[in-house]
Image (tube, rainbow, N blue to C red):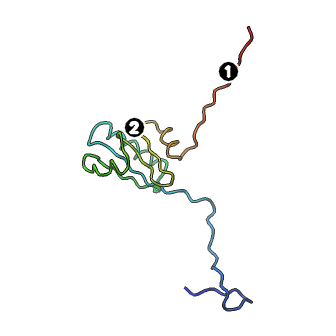
C-alpha cells in the first residue's frame, strides 16, 4: 500500500486514508457450543430450542457447534462440562454457560446477553408498629 501524503505536508509524513464509518454499532457474532449426550429426548429438545432461538434472534450472526460428549469425551474436561445439555457461549466474551434444554427463551436470551436482563425488585417490607 502506498502511503498517502497530506496536501501541504512533507513527503515523509503520512496519514491513514479515511474509512467510512458504519452508521451504528456492529452487532456481535456469537460462537456457541452445545454439549449433549447422545440422542436423548432432552438433547434433541435442546438442539431444536437453540436453533430456533438463534434463527429468530441472531440470523446470520452465529455459529453453533453441537458436540455429543459420548463421541467426543475429550471436550468434557477441556470445557469443564459437568451436566448436559450445556450451552457454552465462547464469543462474545465473557464465556457463559447455560444448562438445561433451553426451553425458557427469555432466560436463554438473558443468559446470552441478547435481551436485557429483567431485574426483579421486590418492594421493601414495611414494619408496622402494633
Q: CA distance from mark 1 to mark 2?
A: 34 Å
Residue 125's label in the rendered image is: 1
Q: Quadrant of the N terminus?
A: bottom right
Callout 2 environment at 10 Å: few (<14), some (14 to 19), or many (20+)? some
Which residue is painted at 32% across and 51% down in the image? 75
Question: Which of disc 2 and disc 1 is earlier in sequence?
Answer: 2
Q: Quadrant of residue 20?
A: bottom right
Disc 1: CA contacts within 10 A as few (<14), some (14-19) or many (>=20)? few
Q: Can you name the residue that lies furthest to the bottom here?
A: 11
Label 2 secondary element: loop
Residue 98 figure quarter? top left
Residue 120 vs residue 73, the one in the foreground:
73
Is label 1 in contact with label 2 (beta carbons under 8 Å)?
no
**Labelled disc at residue 100:** 2
x and y percent of residue 49 in the render?
Answer: 40, 41
Q: In the image shown, does 103 or 37 lie closer to the viewer?
A: 37
x and y, in percent, of residue 15 in the image: 66, 81
Q: Residue at x 68, y 24 (%)?
A: 124
User: Left or right: 73 with respect to 46?
Assistant: left
Please state the horizontal and vertical placement of residue 114, each as a whole percent of the image.
Answer: 53, 47
Amino acid at each position: 500500500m502506498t502511503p498517502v501524503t497530506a496536501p501541504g505536508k512533507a513527503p515523509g509524513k503520512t496519514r491513514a486514508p479515511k474509512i467510512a464509518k458504519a452508521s451504528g454499532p456492529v452487532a456481535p457474532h456469537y460462537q456457541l457450543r452445545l454439549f449433549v449426550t447422545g440422542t436423548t429426548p432432552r438433547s434433541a429438545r435442546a438442539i431444536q430450542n437453540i436453533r430456533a432461538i438463534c434463527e429468530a434472534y441472531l440470523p446470520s450472526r452465529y455459529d453453533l457447534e453441537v458436540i455429543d460428549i459420548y463421541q467426543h469425551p475429550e471436550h468434557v474436561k477441556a470445557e469443564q462440562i459437568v451436566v448436559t445439555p450445556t450451552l457454552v457461549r465462547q464469543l462474545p466474551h465473557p464465556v457463559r454457560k447455560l444448562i438445561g434444554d433451553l426451553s425458557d427463551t427469555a432466560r436463554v436470551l438473558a443468559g446470552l446477553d441478547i435481551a436485557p436482563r429483567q431485574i426483579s425488585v421486590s418492594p421493601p417490607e414495611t414494619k408496622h408498629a402494633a
